[in-house]
Image: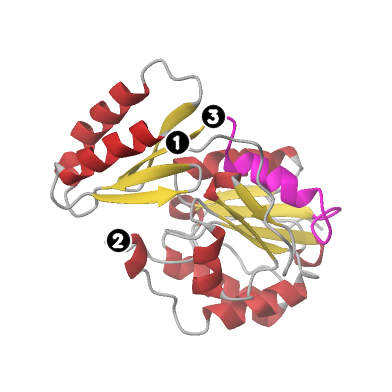
Amino acid sequence: MSLDRLPPLPASALLLDLDGTLLDLAPTPDSVVVPAGLRDTLRALRDRLGGALAIVTGRPVETIDALLGDAPYAVAGEHGGAVRHAPGEALQRPPLPAPPAELLAAAERLAAAHAGVLLERKARGFALHFRAVPESGPVLHDALAEMLAGSSTFELLQAHMLWEVRPRGMDKGKAVQALMARAPFAGRTPVFIGDDVTDEDAMRAARALRGAGFQVAEAFGSPAAVRAWLDGAAAAGDWPPLPIAGDRPALS
């Protein structure tokens, strides 16, 4: 396996997905657990990186604040639908539509018709979680695809045991580009870590900026291994070797 080269840590900007990357996946979005010491590790890394540490997630920014507090310098939520570039700044939202009421009502009926399916509302879309009833995945997909048939405004994406509906033109790659255009990220080399299909745009954006993109399963194996790797980086001030064979050394 050939993995991207890591830039030297002092010249890096670190951009991290949340669920399945920093945090272990949980049965429901509200039941995730923030391990002891994670916030301290992120704060220490943020200091090592001159502030250039961000969370890039499909979750709302308010959820990241509740889970991680002031540990990240910047947060991009809702797949780039809401970006806070610095602590205390107002959220910036691109001019994208919210889902129409009839689409939300149809999603509510769909979730109610399948016991164990959870509807998660977002400002610019929604997600149907089916981790508790994985056999419902194909049925939910087909129903959502039918709802969106012919839509030029919204699209359907797959993530871990969920289907997400979001506006077209919004993705984590654009969030990475927006973050990297502003201090303290500008002029640094991005390192993005994520775990599912929705993170691939961010990995491509990081690589386009001559940085690195890592998929958790390929480079680390698990969120626990990601956290251990970050602990080592925070302590040493340098990137440790990646846990899975195929690691390539940092650029000199």
- Mark 1, residue position: 99
Precedes in sequence: disc 3 or disc 1: 1
**In which quadrant of the rendered image does the C terminus lie?**
bottom right
| Image: 246 above or below 99 | below
Q: Which amino acid does label 1 sit on?
A: Pro
Describe the element under mark 3 as helix, strand or loop: loop
Q: What stretch is highlighted in magenta?
A: 168-188
Precedes in sequence: disc 2 or disc 3: 2
Describe the element under mark 2 as helix, strand or loop: loop
Instruction: Compare residues 182 and 98 and report the one nearer the observer.
Output: 98
Asked if residue 223 can be seen in this view, the reply is: yes
Task: Give the x, y percent position of residue 241.
Answer: 60, 65
Task: Give the x, y percent position of residue 149.
Answer: 36, 18
Task: Give the label, 3 or 1, closer to the camera.
Answer: 1
Which mark is drawn over residue 168? 3
Which colouring convention does the figure follow? secondary structure
Question: Residue 97's quadrant in the figure?
Answer: top right
Q: Are marks 2 and 3 in contact (CB under 8 Å)?
A: no
Question: How far apart are labels 2 and 1 at the CA level?
Answer: 22 Å
* Residue at x-position 59% and y-position 71%: 230
